[in-house]
Amino acid sequence: MKKTKQYFYREWVIYGLLIGLSVLILGRLFYLQVINSAELKARGADFQAIRQTMLYERGTIMDAQGNVLAKSVPVKDVYADPRMLDTSIAKDKTLTSEQILQKKEKIAENIAAILGEDKNDILTLLRKDLAWVSLKRQVDISTVEKIKELDIQGIGFSDNYKRSYPAGEMGAAILGIVNMAGDGVEGLEYSYNAELKGEANLENPVETDQNNEIQDNVQSGDNLTLTLDSTIQHLIEHELDDIVAETKPQRAVILAMDPKTGKILGMGSRPSYDPSNYASTKPDQRKNLAISMIYEPGSTFKIITGSAALEENAINTTQLFKDPGYWVVGGRRITNWDSDRKAHGNITFVDGMKLSSNVVLAQVGQKLGRDLFYTYLKSFGFGSLTDIDISGEERGLLIDKSRVKSLELATMSFGQANLVTPIQLLTAICAVANGGQLMQPYIVENIKNKDGEIVSKTQPKVVRQVISETTSKTMSDILVSVVDSGTGSRAKIPGIKVAGKTGTAQKIDPKTGKYSDTDYIVSFVGYAPADDPKIAVLVVIDTPHAPVVQGGTLGGPRVKNIIEGTLQYYGVPVSAETPSDLTKVDPDALVEEAAAKNGNTAADKNSTPARQAGEGEVLVPDLKGLTIRQAGELLGKLDLRYEFGGSGLAYKQSPEAGKVVNRGDTIEVLFGTGK
């Protein structure tokens, strides 16, 4: 009996403790939600204010000339407090229930018209029984001012930033995109997100202005300066547009690099997109094909096979090879594609390169042997990432060496079977151009803090010595002969030694799994001056539609235009007809003169300005007679964008000198003889 009493006693004690705990919890909730509710709301408001101060003003991305490619601009997020809005409307006691609903509908209609949103969507948000709903994010300041003029209680604004791309689509795939949260998710914006993204200063007390908007100093992220040069990039973009217009390909890529350092001078692809409106694009439009496209390179790869064989003394330049127009190996008949497809008899290795003979290069690959061939494939960087500092790079694909028989070795020797990326191929060919050193490609020159101090600078990096300087010189001479008197003649530039190679690769038909007789990837690679290269350019065109589908025909002229324009821009004379002497014209003096003219006088002695330039406007300067470099520097310092065509000296421009335009407008300039 005693034990039973003790049992019930312990049970009542437990029940008592549970009841007491419940009373304490309920009492605390009553205190917090009723008695102390005002303080909690105040704390919530403080937290919301602090959260809003956590803004990130991303750093600016600039090209090698200092032109802004991406920057952050102040915007506002527009939100509503539907409960406050209801209370505000209900203050007018003369309104009926129907009139209150009509007034809210009118408010929704006015706001929707300004924001460019659907009236019903806004109305649905305003009808919610909530204290906060988002109406639209990242709204331009001018648009916000129109909403403020409506003077609606319950409509508020919070500070934010959005990414702006002054150059439009130029270099879009390089730059990448930034999401609504302010984080880079593609391209350089992603690769350098930590450096570009600023940190909010939360040590200072939060202050608000009369509109209850947060006033806080936001720390900016670091700024990137790229190796990419807008003048060269404009040349690339122009050629890409022409390729698309004339051949309507599935894809097209152009890549330009400094062979001696690995600096990316320009990079573009099609399709492209507007980074300011990325939400309406598809992922395939945003791919940076220069680093992600994998394809069979075709005859441009013969440079690699030939360089390896020369380095190993497996062949020499005068060695004869039999070319009856075909060669049967491993049960397959190999024929020539880039040249006339005819039998050439006994020809030297040099002639085989000039004619782009698959038959000759297949024999060269056999002489080199599978093991050495793979040693050089790996040494040149194929099958591996180049580690360029942009996200999205693919590593290509090499056939497993154990599976390579005589047929595979033959076809790989002239650029079939293995898959490469444009960045891999051009990096490898730059090693042939620069004396044999494989350089690591890069596109960010330096990183500066908001005070302009350099916090990081990229130095050229030699990955390894792949071939000797002797082999490099020998192959460069062979490639010069390809341009001078071979399949690459359309890339010839008077007065300049251009080294180049064509490529025409059959595509695999996905339906049959065999090589197509109708679809090709054509390409051309070139560098100049061959004995002291300043630029190397690779053009790749996927499935072009043209009367003649060959790398030399479609890609050669593109490479020529870009190299010629770049050398002219660099001040290297390309021919007697297009002299270039930068010492004769001082760009800084031109800028000072143009700045003076943007006061009250004409932009040149023969023109009269339509009117005086106002705030945010400039007078178009006279560009005639300037080189690409001089024109680019002058327009860039006047905050004008430009689109260049041709090479040589400027002879035509639009708008004409003396016209008044807005800062940021595009000036079209043609270069050449003017004939």
Image (spheres, helix red, strand yellow):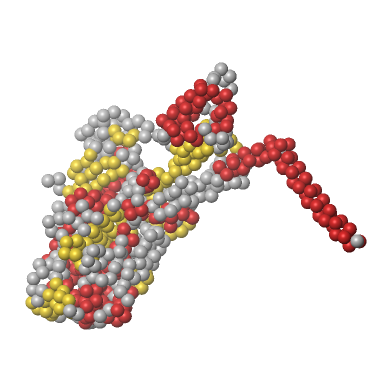
Residue 450 visible in image:
no
Q: Position of residue 126 (x, y in %)?
A: 51, 33
Picture residue at 47% right of the left edge, 27% below the top: 105
Residue 495 placement: quadrant: bottom left
Left or right, 334 with reference to 616: left
Residue 141 placement: quadrant: top left
Instruction: From the viewer's side, name the closer residue of 482 and 18.
Output: 18
Residue 457 visible in image:
yes
Q: How many marks?
A: 0
Picture residue at 29% right of the left edge, 81% below the top: 371
Left or right, 42 with reference to 628: right
Looking at this view, name the residue that lies furthest to the front: 1
Q: Quadrant of the N terminus?
A: bottom right
Does 441 sit above or below residue 315?
Answer: above
Q: Position of residue 664 (x, y in %)?
A: 34, 40
Picture residue at 89% right of the left edge, 62% below the top: 3
Q: Position of residue 478 (x, y in %)?
A: 18, 71
Instruction: From the viewer's side, name the closer residue of 488 and 246.
Output: 246
Does 543 sit above or below residue 635?
Answer: below
Looking at this view, name the residue that lies furthest to the right: 2
